[in-house]
Amino acid sequence: MVEDIKKSIIEPLKPAMTYRERFRRVMHFQSVDKITHWEFGYLDETIERWHQEGLPQWLVRGEGEFSVEKYFGVEPVFYIPVEGGIYPHFEGEVKILETKENIRIEQLPDGTIQEVQIKGVKTIPHYIKMPISNKEDWKRFKERLNPDTPGRNVYDYKALNEKLRHLDIPVGVYFGSFYGIPRNWIGFEHISVMLYDQPDLVEDIIETLTQLYEAQLEKALSEIEVDFAAGWEDIAFRNGPMISPSMFKSLVAPRIKRVCDLCRRHGIDVIWTDCDGNINDLVPVWLESGLNCMFPIEVHSGSDPVKLREKYGKQILLRGGLAKHQFSYGKKEIMEELKRVEKIVEEGGYIPHMDHRVPEDIPYENYKYYIKEKLTMLGWKHDEIKQIEPLSQISDTQDYIHMMESLHNQ
């Protein structure tokens, strides 16, 4: 159980900090001028809706000068380049195997055979055959995961470090996935069976990926100071993970630990994994492995940043955890959701934002209201909030302060 933390880490009288200093201090439970403002991004359909509701037409999803993120004042980060996947990439034409009235069956260069809807409302493809189903298939992939393949290591990290060492924004590095990538190559049902029928093949895939991550990270981290490392899994549903925690602990966790230990040897002690769904049964395994930050913490699926902090205390760091669909209703529901995480925001080690990409059922006015009130909770000053263009014309009422007082008294 976490010890009681009487004082908020937000100290409004502190001198203004750089983005990088603020991120580092928040994730180490240290006092800050205000909490880091991040979001997880937006669905294309959301931006299309908002364009009809007042969002300037020139704004798009993603990074850059014309991104919705920048428009809403989301604080920037920089990821150093690491080639930690298939190389060289599978190239070639998509083969059309069959065309029916509304669908097309096609084979991708990596061997995937999929059914694509070509009329009506488009959906994600239906996969008929995944690219890896046996050891022969795996050989085609394994030869493209060699860390020493000519052309893979083209980055001059020493020169990049000269540009980054005085940077005032957080610097991160991706290290990939340990089980999520094999699942994508093999398919959910097939890899679940393969764990029993061909466990040596699954283990070889995970070990090969691990060795690639280790080699690539060592090259980069030996030259560049990095603030955080980020991976992903996406291996959980609403009812829990698609692999038993005990099997994950024996097969995958030791490899994760090797990568996390490498990161810590190079000074990185904020390491997260991106996994949707109910992650509760995997959290203790991840923590033991060295992954200490959970993201995006989908509330509707059963994950909850408040409960995770109650259970694991300062051992755990958090990102996300605001139930996205609450923001499609009204001001009261928005305030209640912010109130729900208020205490752990003040404790530190937590950057709150929606628990996945902003869905299209959230009106533009609701989102503007949410951002304004979230920033107020995070300790941003009135004048700082007003400098964010879409918030500059919003009413000056201090709804967050008034609502919190009301909710405290209920």
Image (cartoon, rainbow, N blue to C red):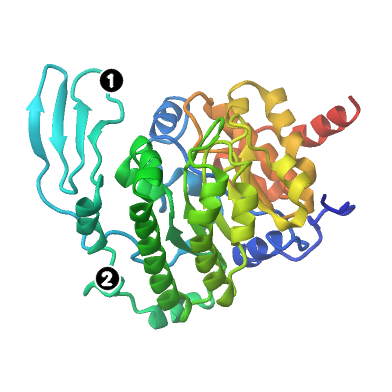
Tell me where residue 71 appears, x and y as whole percent. Answer: 50, 45
Q: Quadrant of residue 268?
A: bottom right
72 displayed left or right of 116:
right
Look at the numbered discs 2 and 1 and tell me whether their residues touch, using CB distance below 8 Å.
Answer: no
The residue tagged 1 is 121
Looking at the image, which is closer to me, 139 or 341? 139
Looking at the image, which is closer to me, 143 or 115? 143
Indicate the amino acid at tag 2. Arg
Tell me where residue 45 appears, x and y as whole percent. Answer: 40, 29
User: Which residue is drawn at the image coordinates 55% and 39% (left, top)?
Assistant: 390
Q: Let me know if residue 74 appears in the view.
A: yes
Element type at mark 1? loop
Tell me where residue 171 appears, x and y as whole percent. Answer: 52, 66
78 displayed left or right of 132:
right
User: Which residue is drawn at the image coordinates 39% and 56% (left, top)?
Assistant: 203
Element type at mark 2? loop
